[in-house]
Amino acid sequence: MKNKSFIIGLVLGASCLLIVTTRTVAADATLLNASFDIARELFQNYNEAFVRHWKKETGENLVVNQSHAGSSKQARAVIDGLEADVVTFNQVTDVDAVAERGLIAREWRRQFPNQSSPFSSTIVFLVRKGNPKGIKDWNDLVKPGVSVIVPNPKTSGNGRYSYLAAWGYALKQSAGDEAKAREFVVKLFANVPVLDTGGRAATTTFAQREIGDVLLTFEAEVFLTVKEFNAGKFEAVVPSYSIEADMPVAIVQKVTAKRGTAKVARAYLEYLYSDEGQGIAAANYYRPRSQKVAGKYAAQFGELELFSVEKVFGDWASAQKTHFGEGGVFDQLYKKSK
């Protein structure tokens, strides 16, 4: 039987915003975590663990509320007044956008280890059982007759990572030829029938609406979907080369100062780096920073060569401006692909 909560998440994936309360208790304190759409299952498990930890450490009953939507949509929601105590996004530019409005400290990357990124993911493929189109690597995605599902890079961090991963692969295959990379990405998006606004909505399109031959999404979403649809409907395909996707976190200091939640908000994000927090991330198919935990889960993750945004594109700010800004490279190539 499919996991009911996961299927509900798929059905709700296209909605603008979902807020979930982890427990119904008399609370001494509450937190709101604004997170990206496919992280529902991860933080459902993590919140339960942290609530137990906080009770043991302080004796306080804590309720953690969870808000989910696309990462960039969540950044906009916080800017527009969503009073989240913490944000757990999938792209640094989304945190930067909130920081630019004075809600998060400018030096947020220095507040926690690994530049405030407690775990990471990458982009891999989800195909239908038996892999009928024989998809093994990025070059198979541009073949005629292959239908590719990917979130919109303009609205989804998931989509931006997928776009940049394809670009990086094409650059590697062409020895750095930018024209060849452009040509490759045009061909890929010519095979995209629909652009959903977020990662979970794209999963819904592929898994529930049964559109497309292959889904590009975070590794965590791919393996979670394979696990939950245990009748054998889907298979994971790990490409030869992909992008390292950092998952940044930050305290929304303007909100925590107002609500008196600074201490518990910091503890909530710090605990993501604990053995238990890292283990929960790994169990939900995110790549932990802890070498001890990573070793325990080594067999779970496919072996592939990863590149960073900084290595290929300079930094996220440059990638955002060049590729995803209004009239940028993505807009130009997507128009050409259609």
Image: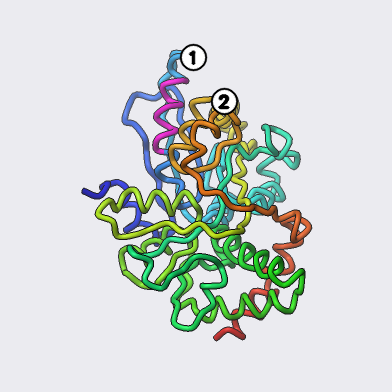
Tell which of 284 and 18 is nearer to you.
Answer: 284
Residue 253 location, quadrant? top right
Q: Disc 1 marks which residue?
A: 57
Residue 254 location, quadrant? top right
Q: Quadrant of the C terminus?
A: bottom right
Residue 92 visible in image: yes
Question: Of the residues under marks 1 and 2, which one precedes in the sequence?
Answer: 1
Question: Residue, x 40% and y 64% (percent of image)?
Answer: 127
- Residue 56 lies, in percent from the top left, at 44, 14
Could you classify mark 1 by the number of other residues whose Cα lies within 10 Å: few (under 14), some (14-19), or many (20 or more)?
few
Q: Amino acid at mark 1?
A: Glu
Q: Is residue 311 left or right of residue 186?
A: right
Question: Residue, x 54% and y 60% (percent of image)?
Answer: 239
Secondary structure of residue under mark 2: helix
Report the coloring of the rendering.
rainbow
* Magenta stretch, overall SS: helix
Q: Is residue 200 left or right of residue 311?
A: left
Q: For residue 158: magenta?
A: no
Q: Disc 2 marks which residue?
A: 267
Residue stretch rendered in magenta on the structure: 44-53
Q: Amino acid at mark 2?
A: Ala
